[in-house]
C-alpha cells in the first residue's frame, strides 16, 4: 500500500503569520495534535505540534539551565530557545525542517521515517504543495478497515490449511512437527514448543489466514534442558530471575 491509499486529504492547516493561540484553538476544535503550516500559495513551510507548546513562558515551563551550561551554549542557541518559548506567531515556534513523502511512497517507508525521526505524522506533498498527511491514526484506521469482515466464503478447509502451513514454514521460529487440522474454518494445532512466545506467534499466524474463524492450540511445552514436557493448559514451572 502507498501513502495516497490511507492519507487524510481534508486537512486543517494554519498560516505562518497566525497567532499561536489561533493554532492552539484549531488543534482543540479539530482534535488534532499537529498542524501543517502553509503559506498563501499553498506551499508547505513548516509544521506546528503539541510539542511546540510544552516549553512556554506563559505556563512557566521554559527551560532553566545552569549558568555555566548557558555560557557554553552561547548567545545564538539561547536566542533560539527564547523565540520558541516566547514567540507569538506560528512561524516563530514551528518546525521548519519537515520530513515529507509523496503520494507514491510505500507505507513501510513512511513507518521508517516516523520511527527514525520520532514523529507522529508525515505530510504528503506534490512538488512543494501539500496534498495530504499520514498520521499514526491513519495506520490504525487502515488496519481496522482491512480486518473488517475479512472472511473468504470460497475458502475450503484444505485451502485454509495449506495457507497456514505456508505461513508457518516461512518463519524460522516455527518448530518442527506441528499438526494443523481445519474443519469449518476452525483450526486445531498440535505439537511441541520450547518457548511460550512461540505459542502466541503460532496462534497469531493462524488467526491472520483468510477464512479462519477460530484457533485452538494444543501445544505441549518441553523443557529444553531436561526434556520434561507439560501438556496443554498445565501450570508451567516458574523461571527464576
Image: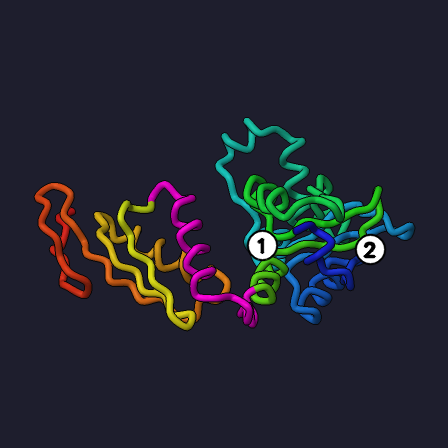
Q: Label 1, on which residue?
A: 54
Q: Earlier in the sequence, mark 2 or mark 1?
A: 2
Residue at 80%, 53% in the rendered image: 131
Q: Quadrant of residue 113?
A: top right
Residue position marked by numbered label 2 in the rendering? 15
Q: Which residues are magenta?
A: 147-173
Q: Could you say where residue 145 lies in the image, as x and y percent from the top left? A: 60, 66
Figure check: 211 above or below 42: below
Q: Which mark is residue 203?
A: none
- Foreground pick, 98 / 172: 172
**Does the stretch in magenta take in 151?**
yes
**Image side of residue 213 versus residue 122, left or right:** left
Q: Secondary structure at mark 2?
A: loop
- Please identify the quarter of the rendering in which residue 25 is found: bottom right
Residue 191 vs residue 181: left or right? left
- Placement of 10 over or under 114, stated as above or below: below
Tell me which residue sits at (14%, 63%) in the image: 234
Image side of residue 151 versus residue 48, left or right: left
Horizontal and vertical percent for residue 49? 65, 54
Q: How many marks?
A: 2
Amino acid at each position: 500500500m502507498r501513502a495516497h491509499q490511507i492519507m487524510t486529504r481534508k486537512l486543517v492547516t494554519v498560516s505562518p503569520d497566525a497567532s499561536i493561540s489561533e493554532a492552539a484553538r484549531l488543534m482543540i476544535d479539530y482534535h488534532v495534535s499537529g498542524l501543517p503550516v502553509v503559506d498563501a500559495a499553498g506551499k508547505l513551510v513548516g509544521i506546528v505540534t503539541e510539542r511546540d507548546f510544552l516549553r512556554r513562558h506563559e505556563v512557566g515551563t521554559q527551560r532553566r539551565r545552569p549558568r555555566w551550561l548557558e555560557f557554553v551554549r552561547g548567545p545564538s542557541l539561547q536566542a533560539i530557545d527564547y523565540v520558541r518559548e516566547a514567540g507569538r506567531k506560528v512561524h516563530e515556534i514551528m518546525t521548519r525542517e519537515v520530513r515529507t513523502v509523496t503520494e507514491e511512497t510505500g507505507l513501510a517507508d513512511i513507518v521508517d521515517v516516523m520511527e527514525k525521526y520520532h514523529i507522529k505524522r508525515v505530510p504528503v506533498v506534490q512538488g512543494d504543495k501539500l496534498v495530504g498527511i499520514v498520521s499514526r491514526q491513519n495506520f490504525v484506521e487502515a488496519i481496522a478497515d482491512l480486518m473488517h469482515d475479512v472472511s473468504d466464503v470460497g475458502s475450503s478447509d484444505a485451502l485454509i490449511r495449506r495457507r497456514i502451513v505456508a505461513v508457518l514454514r516461512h518463519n524460522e521460529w516455527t518448530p518442527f512437527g506441528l499438526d494443523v487440522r481445519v474443519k469449518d474454518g476452525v483450526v486445531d494445532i498440535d505439537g511441541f514448543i520450547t518457548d511460550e512466545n512461540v505459542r502466541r506467534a503460532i496462534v497469531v499466524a493462524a488467526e491472520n489466514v483468510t477464512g479462519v474463524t477460530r484457533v485452538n492450540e494444543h501445544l505441549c511445552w518441553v523443557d529444553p534442558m531436561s526434556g520434561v514436557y507439560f501438556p496443554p493448559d498445565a501450570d508451567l514451572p516458574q523461571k527464576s530471575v
